[in-house]
Image: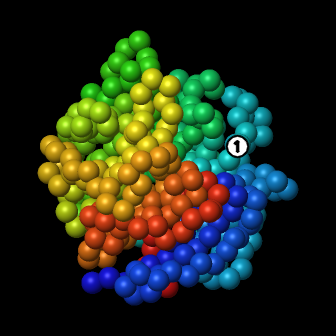
Amino acid sequence: MTEAIQLLVGTRKGAWIYRSDAAREAWQVEGPMFLGQIVNHFVRDPRDGRTLLMAASTGHLGPTILRSTDGGATWSEASRPPAFPKGDPHGRSVDHSFWLEPGHTEEPGVWWAGVSPPGLFRSADGGDTWESVEGLNSHPQVMDWFPPQGGTPDGAILNQVIVDPRDARHMYLATCSAGVLETTDQGATWRPLNRNVRCDFLPDPYPEFGQDSHFVALAPTDPDRLWQQNHCGVYRLDRPGERWERIGEAMPKEIGDIGFTIVPHARDRDTAWIWPMDGTEVWPRTSPGGRPAAYRTRDGGASWERQDRGFPTEQGWFTVKRQAFCADAADPMGLYIGTTGGEIWMSGDEGESWRQIAAHLPEIYSISAVPAG
């Protein structure tokens, strides 16, 4: 059955909320909110259904967290946003917060934030005040994992936090210069988890760390299955295994397996979607050949099928950033992409067909789908 959905959209120039009817056919828009401000991530707390957080960079406040506890009716700034301690031995100061992650269901009020330069912060009061996670930020190898010169064109980032739904102590991080890191004690200690993940831009193509992990997702029905979209391909890991398998090599050679994000199916551990981009030669970061499409696997990555019905068949040069491809949990699932060209596209039939539901927005940085509250 389908249900009404809210899309929380963060862009380079503010935030919007799109609300659907129960059939996901008609959409109403609210916004812009914080017009002109950079919103890297816009998230709702699934534990209470009311709290909204934005990772924002504002002209007058600088990098901060914006909070609403009433579903977006009113907003306030975090009283103590993520910030490295004064006198940080590595000279770090937060340029922007990039990723926001609600804590475990057994820890109401706990949130996690990944920032640039790479660092991890925790809030225990719904995102109002934030503390440095010293187990990572002061780790003896922190400057090896996160060298000052490393990172993306927009700066080095700790780009994702993933909490194991079965165990609040077990977490993964996706990073742009250390690959995947894992903790089993809620951040007190960390170790790399990158075996067999290529790193084509380093002298050693299979280092212990140094990879650029664009996105990691746990299969909702099996948290021991990890999907990863890496700078150097698409991978799958089944725990307690330690060795990633490059499943993207089954993609068509003319398309490749380079992209920013991966979305698992809500009910099928073998199904996931990726959004390939052109990663050849100069890395234009556009849809390959100007022909945008999602690709779906239904056999754990052994094969992939193109899903492009409804998209431009030529001259479609947008791509999708790591936080801008998501799904709802309806049956059939709805899939949603926000593009670098400021468009929102959706599929109400698990990728079989696509239609545009919004256009002319600023460049979309993030999109998340939540049940309408």
Q: Reply above or below: 328 against 264.
A: below
- Residue 352 in the image: state x and y as whole percent: 26, 64
Q: Looking at the image, which residue is at 56% across and 31% down?
A: 151
Which residue is at the far front? Answer: 314
Q: Looking at the image, which residue is at 67% across and 74% down?
A: 31
Q: Amino acid at mark 1?
A: Val
- Screen quadrant of the N terminus: bottom left
- Residue 254 in the image: state x and y as whole percent: 29, 33
Mark 1 lies on a secondary structure that is loop
Q: Looking at the image, which residue is at 70% across and 35% down?
A: 92
Residue 96 can be seen in this image: yes
Residue 160 can be seen in this image: no
Where is mark 1, residue-wise? Answer: 94
- Residue 200 in the image: state x and y as whole percent: 39, 21
- Residue 231 in the image: state x and y as whole percent: 41, 34
Q: Reply above or below: 79 against 348.
A: above
**Residue 12 in the figure: left or right of residue 254:** right
Q: Reply above or below: 216 against 130.
A: above
Relative to the observer, which residue lies in front, 350 or 183? 350
**Residue 238 in the figure: left or right of residue 292:** left
**Residue 319 in the figure: left or right of residue 169:** right
Relative to the observer, which residue lies in front, 165 or 45? 45
Rendering colour mode: rainbow
Which residue is at the far bottom? Answer: 22
Relative to the observer, which residue lies in front, 343 or 138? 343
Residue 201 sits in quarter: top left
Number of callouts: 1
Q: Looking at the image, which residue is at 69% across and 62% down?
A: 14
Relative to the observer, which residue lies in front, 39 or 276? 276
Residue 192 sits in quarter: top left
Q: Reply above or below: 52 against 340.
A: below
